[in-house]
Every structure is written in C-alpha cells, then in structure tokens.
Image: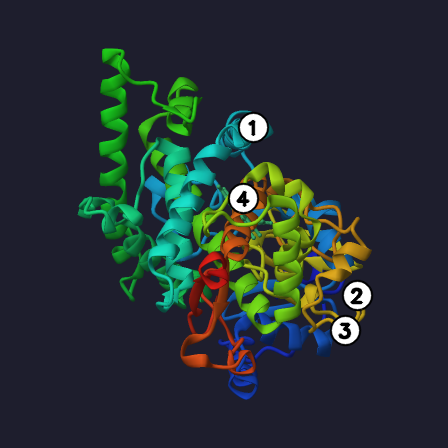
Amino acid sequence: LLRGRSKHTRPLPPGPRPWPVVGNLLNLFLLQRRLRQPPHAVLAAVARAYGPLVYLRLGARSVVVASSPSAASQVLTARDRELSGRYIPATFRISVYTEYSFPWAAHCDDHWRWLRALCKRDIFSIGRVEGHAGLREGKAREMVELLLRRQGEEINVGELVFRTIFNMLGNMLFSRDVIATAGEERGVKSDGSWNLNKVMSRNLQLGIMPNLEDFYAAVFGGLDLQGLRREARKNLEMIYEVFDGVIRERRVEMEEGTGGEEVDGKEDFLKVLLDAGCEDVQLKALFLDIFTAGTDTSTKLVEWTMSELIKNPHVMAQLREELQRVVGSPDRGTTAVRESHLAHLPYLQACIKETLRLHPPVPMLLPHRAVEACEVMGYEVPSDCTVIVNVWAIGRDPEVWKDPLRFQPERFLEACSVDYKGMDFEFVPFGAGRRICPGLPVAARVAPLVVASMVHGFEWCLPGGMGADRLGMGERLGLVLEREQPLVLVPKSINAMAE
Ligand code: HEM
C-alpha cells in the first residue's frame, strides 16, 4: 500500500468511497435500482455529485469517467497518447480475433497504425466512399420498394433498417447481400449461412454481460467460469467459416482471372485488401469489426431519428418540405433521394445531429485504457486504468446546451459550426483523437440517406391510431443505445394518399 501511495504525486479524481472487495459496484447497483436508468445515466448522476472527472473501483478494476467537454478534450486530445489504449472485455479476449481486431487493439501499435492508414487511404477515403454511393442508393431503393408493397402494415423499423444497412456494408465489403431483404419476398431463397446477424448480435450481447474476470482479473482471469468466452468463441468460429468461404471463392476467382469483382464500377474492399496483401485472419477480423461497428450504430441512429420525428410532427413536416423542395416530389412513392442531395439538406443534417446529441449510439465511448499514468485536470489517472467518456452526459449537460432535453434541430442551424468531427468536445458522438471512428465518412452518408428515403415518400404513423404522446422513449444499453421498446410504425405512400 505504502509503495502504491508514494507512486502518486497527485490525488486520484474524486468519487464515492469504495467498499472492501466490491469497491463501488454496490454503490452503482443501489443507485441503478433507485434511478431505474441505464448505466450511462447512472454515471451521469455520479458526475453531478462528484464532478466531471470521477474515480471508481469496480471490484479490483480502476475506472475514470470523464463527463464534461473539457474532461473529454483532455482525455481524447491532450492525453491522447497515454489514454488511447483499449480495455478489452474479458469475453472478447480470443486471440484469433483480438490480436487482429481494430476496435479491440489494446495498444495503438504498428498493426493498428497500418490498419488505420489502410482505412483512411483505401477503404474510407472520400473517393472510395463516394464511389460506392450508387450501391447504397440501390439498397435504400430496395427498402422503399418493400415499404410500398407493405403499405398500411406494421413495420419494425429497426429490423428493416438493420437489414438495409447490413447489406449496404456487405456489398461495400465483398459485393454480396448478407441478409435476404426484398429478395426473400421475390422468392430468392436466403442461404442460411448468410444469416450472420443473429450470431453477431448474440456475440455483442455476450460482450456486455457482467464478467467476473473484468472485475477480479487476478483471481478469475482466464478461468471463464461463466462460459461467456466459450460461447463467444463458438459464435466466432461460425462467423469466420462464412467469411472463409467468401475469401476462398474470391482468391480462386482472382487466380483464374475472373475475379476482381467490381461494385458499381469500383473495386470492393475485399479486392483492395487482398491487393494490399492482407492475410485471411486479418480480413476476417476486419470484416467482423466493420459489420459490428457499423451496422448497429447506424441502425439505432435511424431508429432514434424516426422516433423523434414521430414525437415532433412539426419537425417531420419541415423535413419533408425540405426533401420535396430539394429532391422533388416523390414519383409514385419511389425514392429519388441520392447521396449527392445530402449536402443540400441542412435541416436533415440538423435532425441527425440533434439525434446524435440526445441519443448517441455509443453513449460511452468504447473503453479507453491508460497505457501509462498521466495527469488529467490536476488528478492522477493510474496506469492500466479504464477511461470512459460519457458522451450521453455531455450531450444533455444544461451548462453546455440550452433546454437540453428538447429535440430542437434548429440549434444546429444556428450554431452550424458545431460538428461531430472530433473538434467540438461538447459533441463527440464519434469520439476524437487517434481512436476517432474511422467509419465516420460512411456513417455520415448512410443514416441521412436512409432517413431521407423513409421520410421523402411516406407518411408514418403509430399502429392502431396511437397518439405520438404515447410513444415511449425509454433507453436500454446493449453495446449500443437501444430503444426500450422497438419502434413499430405504419407507412403510407404520399402518392397513394394524394390519389
Ligand atoms: C452512427 C454510426 C456510428 C457511430 C455513432 C460510431 C461511433 C464510434 C465510436 C464512438 C467509436 C469509438 C471511439 C473511441 O474509442 O474513442 C467508434 C469506433 C470505431 N468505429 Fe464507429 N461509429 C459509427 C459507424 C461506424 C461505421 C459505419 C463503421 C465502419 C464502416 C465504423 C467503424 C468503427 C471502427 C473500426 C472503430 C474502431 C476504431 C479504433 O478503435 O481505432 N463505425 N465508432
């Protein structure tokens, strides 16, 4: 103890007094029971009591939580070098995955740097992302066609959007639909092996289940008493088997000279990555990372945006008016929204930003880790400590945002310089610094395109004539911020209504 103490020349950040053995787990459990709120809201309440930088002990694990713009700026930029390690949840410590994974790279080491550079230059470069615009527009069109066929029926918005975005990414990655969407209805039989979404969702669920190893690594580390890692490994094998098939097929095509599959006139990621000399194990980890990091996040953003639009009909009307002015009247309900329209739709962009402020899909940035001890706001952040940035709390801070709980897209029209690109620390839904989301250029197109396609040609209402005031907006934290109840809506084509 004495040695431990003498190491710190600065005090630890303030926080509730820890109990022996359990640390603050008990405090948090009791607070959660009292507030009946998800973890990010509970941590926001702790920050209100102790300040913007809080120190907690979760069992034997040290955690620092940053909950203000200046604390976030310190963690994500001033101390970016020391705090950009990643805490890997025990359930995900499966070497064949984490050794090659991008989000779960424990250090910003040479492999991570190589992957980031590859993404920036070859995968998420503006040119490459724009080159795939037609492909994403095609998937959005398929979604609209399906909505036209199912007018007047109840639609689970999250499920539909998930399929659409999953297939957008599947086609960008390796030129394939991953889940049957409209094809299923047209009688195209979906191949069971392609139904990856369920296995992937299960793995995400496993990742957030409390794991004893995360709290008491010295005692339970590596034992997997709850069997969580075992199940995750089994799922991973199933996912990798499917990716193996795709990669094998492409390698054969390339050897025979029939490959080099092109998407919308451009090369897909698989081709680019094979040309860059990626090994199969790297490709599989990267595919999994992109599907898991890109699909749920973008889907939840669309689902929350639609929820807020239903709750705020005047915003929905104004958005539709903007869409019809810029895109034109929907032609018998068929969307004509294109990605090139997005730059001319400031109100749509403001709606997306306002949703990201109130309902950030990743409410607490993926857990960072101190690769060495450092000072933040005059306090000591010990080496190996987990560091969490509570983006959700920052987005609802009344000292930062006027009337923070109101959905008011206009605030982003007035303060249009506030953006999510990692420079404005009151608004960092994609993070900032070296770990900032590399998929931002894709996310910034996918979610607005899908929302615009849904609003442009359709009126939406709640089932059974339910009033918007009865739509619950309760939250639940999976790996991303989910609605407590799925959003179910009934679409009606605007053209059909006019007729
Ligand atoms: C609305 C959609 C999205 C949101 C809100 C979002 C948000 C985030 C956040 C908060 C992080 C962690 C930043 C940190 O640790 O400081 C992250 C990391 C990441 N995101 Fe996204 N993301 C979205 C979409 C996407 C898409 C579409 C892709 C890929 C196509 C993607 C790929 C990744 C990857 C690979 C990482 C890990 C980066 C690293 O650790 O170095 N994301 N994202």
Q: Give the x, y percent position of residue 116.
A: 54, 33
Q: Give the x, y percent position of residue 346.
A: 70, 49
- Mark 2: which secondary structure? loop
**Residue at 72%, 58% in the rendered image:** 380
Nearest to the eye among marks 2 and 4: give it.
4
Determine the CA span between mark 1 and mark 2: 34 Å
Contact, CB < 8 Å: mark 2 with mark 4?
A: no
Determine the CA span between mark 2 and mark 4: 34 Å
Circle 2 residue: 400
Q: Residues within 10 Å of mark 1 (few under 14, many from 20)?
A: some
Determine the CA span between mark 3 and mark 1: 40 Å
Q: Amino acid at mark 1?
A: Ala
Q: Is 80 rendered above or below residue 35?
A: above
Determine the CA span between mark 4 and mark 1: 32 Å
Nearest to the eye among marks 3 and 1: give it.
3
Residue 412 placement, left or right of 146: right
Describe the colour scheme in one phrase: rainbow
Contact, CB < 8 Å: mark 2 with mark 3?
A: no
Circle 3 residue: 403
**Front position in the image: 55 or 390:** 390
Going from N to C along the chain, the mark reached first, 4 or 1, is 1
Which labelled disc corresponds to residue 117? 1
Which labelled disc corresponds to residue 337? 4
